[in-house]
């Protein structure tokens, strides 16, 4: 069975055999990793496409460079991404670089995690979270 994934670097749609998700699949257009086990900085346009079309859960950290709690959570988010490699993808969106994200997703405060699955927002969690909580929170989507 093939899983549909949007390249978080270039926005190209890709189909990846499910059994290859843990083997570091790459985008057929730009060569960027599709399921790297590390958070990927994403543009607003690419996020919109991935949130609509991806068949693997996508967890997005909405953050800003000036936000102390966001900087505190970044290493925890990276640890969670590594633990969930091949089962979910993790992305980061800088709300300063994409102010339209605030209105589109109803962001009232950061850091904010929003999980997208099967073309819709599945859940959200505000505030700093340790890696174990992020993994637990995300794991519910993987089995859904």
Image (spheres, rainbow, N blue to C red):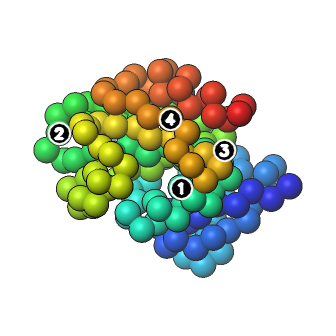
Q: Distance between the residues labelled 2 and 3?
A: 29 Å
Q: Quadrant of residue 25?
A: bottom right
Alpha carbon of mark 1 to alpha carbon of mark 4: how far?
A: 12 Å
Evaluate if marks 2 and 4 touch, with contact meaning CB atoms under 8 Å apart: no
Q: Earlier in the sequence, mark 2 or mark 3?
A: 2
Closest to the camera, between mark 2 and mark 3, is: 2
Label 3 or label 1, whichever lies nearer to me, is 1
Mark 3 nearby-residue class (10 Å; few <14, some 14–19, many ≥20): many
Question: Taking 77 as reference, is 56 left or right?
Answer: right
Q: What element carries label 4?
A: strand
Residue at point 47%, 21% (across, down)? 133
Q: Name the residue under label 3.
A: 86
Q: Let me know if residue 89 appears in the view.
A: no
Badge 2 vs badge 3, beta-carbon distance below 8 Å: no
Q: Earlier in the sequence, mark 3 or mark 1?
A: 1
Q: Which of marks 1 and 2 is nearer the N terminus?
A: 1
Residue carrying label 2: 67
Q: How far apart are marks 4 and 3 (CA)?
A: 20 Å
Q: What element carries label 1?
A: helix
Within 10 Å of disc 2 (Cα), the crowding (few <14, some 14-19, many 20+) is few
| Mark sitting earlier along the chain (1/4) | 1
Q: State the residue in front, 106 or 87.
A: 106
* Cα gap from disc 3 to disc 1, whole angstroms: 17 Å
Q: Is residue 75 above or below residue 17?
A: above
Q: Is residue 115 visible?
A: yes
Q: How far apart are marks 1 and 2 (CA)?
A: 24 Å
Q: In which quarter of the image is the C terminus?
A: top right
């Amino acid at each position: 069975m093939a899983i549909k994934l949007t390249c978080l670097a270039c926005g190209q749609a890709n189909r990846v055999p499910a059994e290859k998700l843990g083997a570091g699949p790459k985008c057929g257009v730009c060569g960027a990793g599709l399921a790297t086990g590390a958070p990927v900085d994403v543009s607003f346009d690419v996020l919109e496409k991935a949130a609509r079309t991806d068949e693997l859960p996508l967890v997005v950290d909405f953050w800003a460079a000036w936000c102390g709690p966001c900087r505190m959570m970044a290493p925890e988010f990276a640890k969670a991404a590594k633990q969930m490699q091949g089962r979910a993808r993790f992305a980061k969106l800088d709300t300063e670089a994409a102010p339209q994200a605030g209105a589109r997703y109803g962001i009232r405060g950061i850091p904010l995690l929003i999980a997208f699955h099967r073309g819709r927002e599945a859940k959200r969690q505000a505030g700093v979270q340790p890696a174990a909580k992020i993994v637990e929170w995300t794991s519910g989507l993987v089995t859904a």
